[in-house]
Image: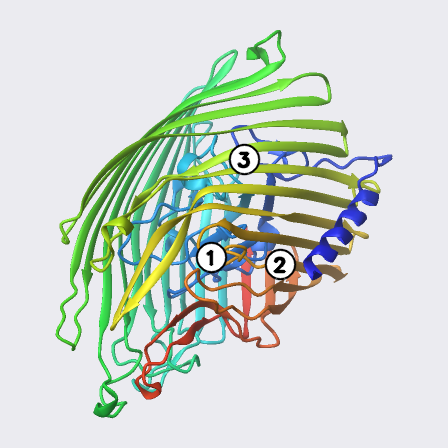
Amino acid sequence: MTSKKLTLSLMAVYAVLNLPAVADEITLDPIVVGADFREKKLSQTSNAVTVIGEDEIYDKASQPLIEVLGATPNVNFSAGASKAKYIQIRGIGERSQFETPVNPSVGLMIDGIDFSSLTLGATLFDVQQIEVLRGPQGTTFGANAMAGMIAVQSNEPTKELEGHIETTVGNYNTKALGVAIGGTLIEDTLLGRFSIYKNSSDGFMENSYLNREDTNNIDELTAKAQLRWFASDKHTIDLNLIHADIDNGYDAFTLDNSLNSHSDQVGEDTQKTNAMALKSTYAFDTMTLISKFSYSKSDMSYSYDEDWSYVGEFDAALWPYMGFDEYNREVKQTDIDIRLMSNKNGRIFAGTTDWTVGAYAKSFDEKLERNHPTDYGAELNFDSRYKSKSVALYTQLDTHLNDKLTLVSGLRVEKWEVEYRDSHNVNVDNDEVMVGGKLGFNYQYNDTLLYYTTLSKGYKPGGVNAGATLSNEDKTFETETLWNLEAGVNSSHFNNTLKSRLNLFYGKRKDMQVKLYEEDTHSFTDYLSNASEGSYYGVESQLDYYANDSLHLYSSIGLLKAEFDDYTKALNGRAPAQSPEYQYNIGLNYQFAEAWTFKTNLEGKGSYYFSNTHDQKSEAYKLVNASLEYSNGTFSASLWAKNITDEEYGVRGFFFSNDPSTGYSPALYTQNGTPQTFGLTMSYDF
């Protein structure tokens, strides 16, 4: 009822705000969105998109990318790892990975490189902009963007020599240092930019048995290099290199859900990635040829103490057990994307239509070795290999029906082939053809008002479940499709001092992929199943009000109603996991002196189910954050605090049997979110 009232209130407010605005002076929109085929100003973008700019990212370089994304409308996250690394948009997305190969529902691109399965390696230093696209991106990105896409863009090379030095210190022994430098390497020919960032923290867990405070530590090193070669007046070549060395500890769950661990076998959560992207842009008289090639190789290890206790903690009569679980993965991925895009001189149909046509190919290879020694007579070691190949053809037409109305039509056809082998003698070969696309209208009423509506289709390929305890029927699951309808308005009022984006959406999911798990004696198996149908609808709003040169007020609100429409009797009508009914982020930036700015925001989220397998829910929570920033143009210092009230909240939850002292009665076990943190970030630009 609360969410319905809030929805009606928001719609009423926007009905007033979005009347045609009369403006004497229009300030140009400085924000450009580049994740779609054609770059557009944010105010002219007919996507449900949130842009997190460089000024918002400052002082967040040491924070997990996924948690920063969680402040945007209808974007949620879950941990179950050293830090949050699983993203959900509108209740769709993964929450964990064990034996089963995963095709992400939410894509993540960093500088043109696909990091959708490598989110632990995503960091925020020297990042210019993050674009969060909600809803199916089937035409542009294909199979791994059914729920949406996150595009991270680092600062690009410039002709002028530029440098940035940044350091952070904080509680929990947090220390970070980053350096970025770029400029002209060869006059009028070659530009470059290089950055390196080291981030470490003991983490907020304590292990009283081992007498350590760093068993859930953060230890990250990332390096980036960018080169831009002007091969000719018409030809530009960009090279991006990324190296990520993440060596985090993992000791996050306890039998009493506290921050005090008793584990005697500390796990780890590591990722070593080397990745590159090569992009060629050649401008013809009537069109542009863009060719992209990217490759990444990653070695990842994820392990944990299965019993969360130490030998001797429980009396033998309680039948305690000892177990340790380790997953080692090697992942290789290659992507090739070639497209032709018309320019203004190349429009077709009497000069009314911009066009894009392209071809895409991807190869993905994942090797898994699971080491699972136990003390109850079972060696549950396991290995598998999952290989997929896909090729796609796509096109999009932007037809300008008149000066104000544009018809957007897109289509993508993708052929997907999968080969899977494991040590349980499961052999699965599968191939299928999937189709996605969109059809929409944009109506530019005037310079300050854009209406749009879009019907889009996304898809996510089926796959195979690992796990010796699963029946043959549960070994595979089917492809999911999502039909999504959006209607929105972007507007600007009062000489561009008030900017708003409002989006209403409805989605229908067919053969909805549902994450479940089953528990046997000291055995936990997760797998994917299919519900016949699911649906969601909701509202997303963003407001920015610049009251004067000193005060900026903002809000972002997401309302979501998601449910299973046709599945099991127990779940019909219930919301899927990770689908809070509301999220909000409300704040202000106030420059109270020439070089001083005070920032504060309130970030909140409603309750949601932790899993589709049980009825346990998270608690609703709100986080208060604030910072005091000094900046004179070259030197900046930010004294910041996150979760000032030290709110307790869970970011992952399981319901099963693991505590001998209760007779192994099922209970809810949660991983805690980040408590109160504070620190000082200083930077120098030259």
How far across and how far down the image is residue 155, in percent? 50, 44
Q: Residues within 10 Å of mark 2 (few under 14, many from 20)?
A: many
Q: Position of residue 70 (x, y in %)?
A: 54, 57
Is 284 situated above or below 28?
above
Q: Amino acid at mark 1?
A: Lys
Q: Quadrant of the N terminus?
A: bottom right
Of marks 2 and 3, which one's residue comes earlier in the chain?
A: 3
Which residue was labeled with disc 2? Answer: 583
Residue 262 at x, y = what percent? Answer: 32, 83
Q: Nearer the viewer, residue 145 or 38?
A: 145
Q: Is residue 185 left or right of residue 397?
A: left
Q: Looking at this view, name the residue that lies furthest to the front.
A: 569
Q: Is the C-beta separation of discs 1 and 2 under 8 Å?
A: no
Say if residue 455 shows up in the picture. Answer: yes
CA–CA distance in space, label 1 to label 3: 44 Å
Which residue in the protein does label 3 denote? 34
Q: Please, what is the three-letter code of the amino acid marked with disc 2?
A: Gln
Is 146 placed left or right of 252 in the picture? right
